[in-house]
Structure formats: structure tokens, C-alpha cells
Image (cartoon, rainbow, N blue to C red):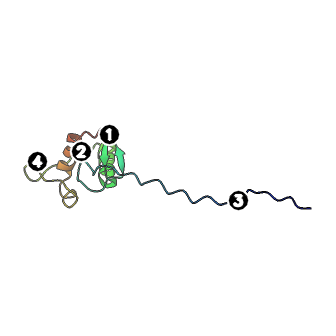
């Protein structure tokens, strides 16, 4: 004969996904950050720019007054000022 149990298997509700990590905006250009890279909160663009600049020992020239505004829209206009801002906000090898 079959034995019956008073316990029933009740599926547990699916556990909620953990909240996505929220990082501060990129310290260099204020774009959405992908995490902490080279010591600061940085977007993928600035992370890659800094990595390439350091690995290749790049020397850039500013064609203005060495104080260009660096933000999400203007970050590709002046590599010199972008790299300077990387250092100013604390990026390091």
C-alpha cells in the first residue's frame, strides 16, 4: 500500500534578482560608469582611452588653451585634456 504524508511539496517562489550595481558616473566625462577602473569610477570609453594612452606612452597636444571641457559629448575632441583629466580625477596605472 502507499504511505501518505501530510507534507506537500510546495515550490518556493523564485528569489528576486539582486539589484544591479549602481556606480557613480564616470569621473572623467560623467557618462554611465561600468565600474571602478584604474582607481576611479569610469566608463568603458575613458577606461580604454586611459589604458591605450598609458600602454603606448602617448603624447597628445591641445590645440586650444589646455582647459577644454571634457564631458560625454566633448570627450573625443581633445585627447590632451581628456588624459589630463584622467590624471586629475585620480586614474593611475
Residue tagged 1: 39
Query: Could you tell me how far apart the alpha carbons at marks 1 and 3 are, in whole angstroms?
Result: 49 Å
Question: Who comes first in sequence, dot 4 or dot 3?
Answer: 3
Choose mark 4 or mark 3, whichever is in front. 3
Pick the residue in front: 48 or 88.
Answer: 88
Task: Look at 33% across and 46% down and name the residue there.
Answer: 51
Which circle marks residue 69 in the picture?
none
Quadrant holding the N terminus: bottom right
Question: Who comes first in sequence, dot 2 or dot 3?
Answer: 3
Quadrant holding the C terminus: top left
Would you say the residues marked 1 and 2 are in contact, meaning their CB atoms lie under 8 Å apart?
no
Residue tagged 3: 9
For label 1, count other residues whose C-alpha is less than 10 Å away and answer few (under 14), some (14-19) or many (20+).
few
Query: Could you tell me how far apart the alpha carbons at marks 4 and 2 are, in whole angstroms?
Result: 14 Å
Measured from the top left, where is residue 33 in percent x and y?
A: 32, 52
Task: Look at 21% across and 52% down and name the residue there.
Answer: 79
Q: Would you place residue 11 above or below residue 88 in this image?
A: below
Residue tagged 2: 86
Q: Residue furthest left?
A: 65
Residue tagged 4: 66
Choose mark 4 or mark 2, whichever is in front. 2
For label 2, count other residues whose C-alpha is less than 10 Å away and answer few (under 14), some (14-19) or many (20+).
many
Query: Could you tell me how far apart the alpha carbons at marks 2 and 3 are, in whole angstroms?
Result: 57 Å
Question: Who comes first in sequence, dot 1 or dot 4?
Answer: 1
Amino acid at each position: 500500500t502507499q504511505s501518505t504524508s501530510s507534507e506537500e511539496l510546495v515550490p518556493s517562489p523564485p528569489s528576486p534578482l539582486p539589484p544591479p550595481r549602481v556606480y557613480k558616473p564616470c569621473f572623467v566625462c560623467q557618462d554611465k560608469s561600468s565600474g571602478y577602473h584604474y582607481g576611479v569610477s569610469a566608463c568603458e570609453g575613458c577606461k580604454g582611452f586611459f589604458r591605450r594612452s598609458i600602454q603606448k606612452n602617448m603624447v597628445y597636444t591641445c590645440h586650444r588653451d589646455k582647459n577644454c571641457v571634457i564631458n560625454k559629448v566633448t570627450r573625443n575632441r581633445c585627447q590632451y585634456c581628456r588624459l589630463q583629466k584622467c590624471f586629475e580625477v585620480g586614474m593611475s596605472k
